[in-house]
Image (cartoon, rainbow, N blue to C red):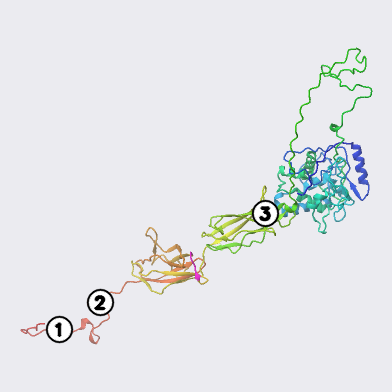
Amino acid sequence: MAVHMRRRLRKGATTTAVAAAAVAALAASQAPAATLAVGSAGGGDQKAAGEDTADDGAATGNSPYYTDLPPLVTPDKPGSSSKLPMTGSAEAGIPASVLAAYKQAEQTVAATDPACRLPWQLLAAIGKVESGQARGGRVDANGTASPRILGPALNGQGFALIKDTDGGAYDGDAVHDRAVGPMQFIPSTWASWGQDANGDGRKDPNNIYDAALAAGRYLCANDRDLALSADLDRAVLSYNRSTEYLRTVRSWLSYYQRGTHEIPDGTGALPTAPSTPVGSSPDSRPSPGPRPGGSSKPTLPEPGGKPSPDSSKPGGDGSTSPTPTPNPPAPNPPTPKPPAPKPPTAEPTPAETFGSLENAGTGPLRATAGQAFGERVSVRARNALGAPLAKVPVTFTVTGTTGTLFTGGKKTVTVRTGADGTATAPVLLAGEQAGEFTVTAVAGTGRPRTLTYAATVTARQADTIVRTDEKVLTAAPGEKFADAVTVKATHKDAAAAGVAVTATMVKDPAGLIDNDEGPYFKDADGKPVRTLTTLTTDAEGMLRLPEIHADGTEGTYLLRLTAEGGASVVIELTVQAPDEAAPDGASPDETAPDGASPEETAPEEKAPEGTKTPEA
């Protein structure tokens, strides 16, 4: 925050009557600017545990604030407060335009910085303490306070000394700054945090819509989570560095969280007890001097704690005893050297404060195993004002079991946002395992913002699978097929490597009915199986099937191969017994002359008796 380093506001005391009269006069007047009065209630400016200590500035310049407390009677449960009571001038309801501005600011901040968890009731509590809900809702139709709401001049006379920073543009004071508007921003803080919430093209601290949104973003700075008590305390103390201020805001916050109701604009009652400047606290008053005619020497107490009579008055105690001589004073102890002050550390301005992380247009993350993702994860960082923020480190991490990594083989990379607030992760390379994984983007410290993207790796695919030859595949019953089956898978005419292929014996060409007889494969134990699901093409898209065996049944069978991606091919397998061989090498098709069968051939004629058979 570009909050100026100023001296903390010291508190004192005046009288309640003066405060009430001053505030009543201001509320009744229609002067061009109504100024918060100085009253009697002690404000206390000591720091509380857990309070921001980066600098001593505050959104309001530690200007006075109203110390009225909520009514003692509160709703029994949330939502039961349609008729909250009113105690004195502490009106329980909230004017309509003021309430609408608080709720609008809550919604706007929730959209840009949901991790802050800003409740509108906190804005209402601060608005109540700072300006009495814009002086009871005295705003025009656009939500602008009329007349302006101004705090006292921060001239160092009981207040912080803050010389003019805006030339009087906001507060009409060209010498010293004043807190301005329903949320009481000093001009230097408004210059950094001012908002245009009502869309009129102006950032007006006197407009309740602009001021409420500015207050919401201011309270959410430094990665605060206002659902955490410690962060909420730090936020409130950054607005006004007073423990009494924190207690007062906390009391109204608790009251509004139990319930409240809307009242018409301009009908709210103005609080009557602002905090006080320095100079009138009983503890800070100077000790009185010696009484006229009296001794300037201190009188000593008697034993038992009673003061000694005044020795300057003879016979003051009915005696003439001399005044006891006091013991000589002890030598003054050495004055301790004060610790060296810590150098002030300016908080970042809203333009420098990281506010939110959003998707910068990342599309669906899907890729085939082993391939690069066509889409890259991209995020955009925004500052506390909702504008793109550069130089924010964003860490991208891949989580899952697919084997997917960023280019370079890394699971985690860090990239800083550019001038447009975007950071884009390196290209993702899909692993070999099909399935889903996530990419997370994390930015911010203390209370980081996280985005998660789902991604998918699909198995390698083929759009075509064919046999590499056209041999007829046959086998005798009980034997194995002599020729191996080899196929090639392609995707878009390129070899499809690593594609899963399923081989199944089927009964029909469409492969819809599995076959439980005929040819089969063997599993690792040598048992017949007719479906294989562990086949994968090699680097050239080729696949050679294991040996195929025939059972004892002859016939024609079908083998269907289906590749991941839907491509398939059906191959015919034939089981038949081999043909029998003819005797003596003769062909079984050979027949006797003139078509007679061998059995019909005439027997060989016998030679006459006594005739010798010619020798061969």
Q: Residue at x 25, y 77 (%)?
A: 582
- Where is residue 182 drawn, in percent x and y? 84, 49
Q: Amino acid at mark 2?
A: Ala
C-alpha separation, residue under disc 1 versus residue under disc 2: 23 Å
- Where is residue 175 drawn, in percent x and y? 88, 48
Q: What residue is disc 2 on?
A: 582
| Start-end of magenta stretch | 494-498
Q: Residue at x 63, y 62 (%)?
A: 363
Q: Say which label, 3 or 1, has the lower sequence index.
A: 3
Q: Please give the label number shown on residue 392.
A: 3
Q: Please give the label number shown on residue 65.
A: none
Do the residues under discs 2 and 3 have CB atoms within 8 angstroms?
Answer: no
C-alpha separation, residue under disc 3 versus residue under disc 1: 115 Å
- Asked whether residue 497 is drawn in magenta, I would say yes
- Where is residue 79 drawn, in percent x and y? 77, 46
Q: Residue at x 73, y 57 (%)?
A: 387
Check disc 1 and report its element: helix, strand or loop.
loop
Check the image and name the residue furthest to the bottom: 594
Q: Say which label, 2 or 3, has the lower sequence index.
A: 3
Q: What residue is disc 1 on?
A: 604
